[in-house]
């Protein structure tokens, strides 16, 4: 049975981008063709926007993993994870297990300028906060009697400044154009989808056409090269056992 991929996201285009990206990974590295019913979208009912905004808005001088702001963000993320797992079970009449994946995605809405800046404290700490929140969540569930088989693989991913950067990294002119210096709106969306209106890009088929053209298995190496914020995500999802002799 193919895994269930449940995705917490900001907007509908984020879900479509991540669905295509993850499908490419499973197709290329696991020879698994994920279908529509393998993906679950929480739509606008659940997201990590407020948690990310709290960090970026209030942590200008406090980029510490155990700061008060970080603690608030971690608790908020843990509640979102629990709500997501319960909501999935209720709506799908199916429980997430260790064979499934829960993706916590959010737009940073911040410009990196260059890939090296991802490792600066202001940009990198949110990644550590989210991983710690996940580990704390697992710890709480163990204390409640859960086994590892009863919990999904939870993977966070925050893109700078938005999901359009992943699509842009699949395009041949990524370095030449230096998409890392673009604001999410309007510049990045305009260059990727030829419009800053995501509803329009979805309605007229442009978004689907762009994803089908550029977000393909052959582009995975380019994504890994250009986006340090997706590398751990990719390393985990692309891992596979060696063939048995």
Image: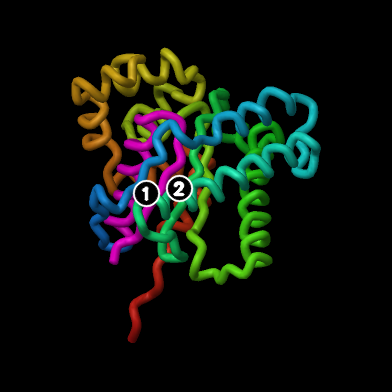
In the image, residue 45 above or below residue 32: above
Which image quadrant is residue 89 in? bottom left
Most foreground residue, 175 or 200: 200
Most foreground residue, 80 or 106: 80
Residue that appears at 51% across and 30% down:
107
Magenta-colored stretch includes residue 50: no
Residue that appears at 27% across and 43% down:
216
Residue that appears at 30% across and 21% down:
193
Q: Are marks 2 and 1 in contact (CB under 8 Å)?
A: yes
Magenta-colored stretch includes residue 26: yes
Number of dots carrying numbers: 2
Q: Which residue is mark 2?
A: 87
Q: Is residue 113 visible?
A: no
Residue closest to the far bottom? 245
- Quarter placement of the C terminus: bottom left
Residues at marks 2 and 1, CA–CA distance in whole angstroms: 6 Å
The residue tagged with tag 1: helix, strand or loop? Answer: helix
Which image quadrant is residue 77 in? top right
Instruction: Give x and y (percent) for residue 174.
Output: 39, 29
Tell me which segment is drawn in magenta: 1-29
Q: Callout 1: 10 Å neighbours few (<14), some, many (20+)?
A: few
Q: Callout 2: 10 Å neighbours few (<14), some, many (20+)?
A: some
Most foreground residue, 18 or 123: 18
Instruction: Give x and y (percent) for residue 158.
Output: 53, 37
The residue tagged with tag 2: helix, strand or loop? Answer: helix
Q: Which residue is mark 1?
A: 91
- Quarter placement of the N terminus: bottom left
Q: Is residue 148 visible?
A: yes
117 to the left or right of 234: right
Q: Main secondary structure of the magenta part?
A: helix
């Amino acid at each position: 049975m193919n895994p269930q991929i449940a995705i917490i996201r900001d907007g509908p285009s984020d879900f479509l981008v991540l669905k295509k990206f993850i499908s490419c990974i499973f197709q290329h590295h696991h020879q698994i063709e994920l279908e529509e019913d393998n993906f679950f979208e929480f739509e606008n009912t659940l997201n990590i926007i407020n948690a990310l905004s709290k960090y970026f808005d209030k942590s200008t001088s406090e980029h510490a993993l155990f700061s008060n702001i970080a603690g608030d963000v971690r608790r908020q993320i843990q509640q979102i994870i629990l709500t997501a797992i319960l909501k999935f079970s209720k709506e799908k009449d199916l429980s997430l297990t260790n064979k499934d994946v829960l993706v916590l995605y959010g737009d940073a809405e911040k410009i990196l300028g260059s890939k090296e800046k991802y490792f600066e404290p202001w940009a990198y700490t949110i990644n550590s906060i989210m991983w710690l929140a996940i580990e704390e969540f697992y710890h709480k569930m163990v204390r409640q009697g859960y086994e590892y088989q009863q919990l999904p693989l939870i993977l966070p991913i925050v893109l700078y400044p938005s999901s359009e950067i992943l699509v842009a990294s699949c395009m041949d002119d990524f370095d030449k154009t230096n998409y890392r210096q673009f604001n999410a709106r309007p510049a990045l969306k305009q260059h990727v989808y030829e419009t800053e209106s995501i509803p329009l890009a979805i309605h007229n088929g442009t978004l689907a056409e762009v994803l089908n053209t550029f977000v393909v298995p052959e582009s995975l190496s380019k994504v890994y090269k250009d986006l340090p914020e997706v590398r751990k995500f990719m390393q985990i999802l692309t891992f596979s056992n060696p063939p048995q002799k």
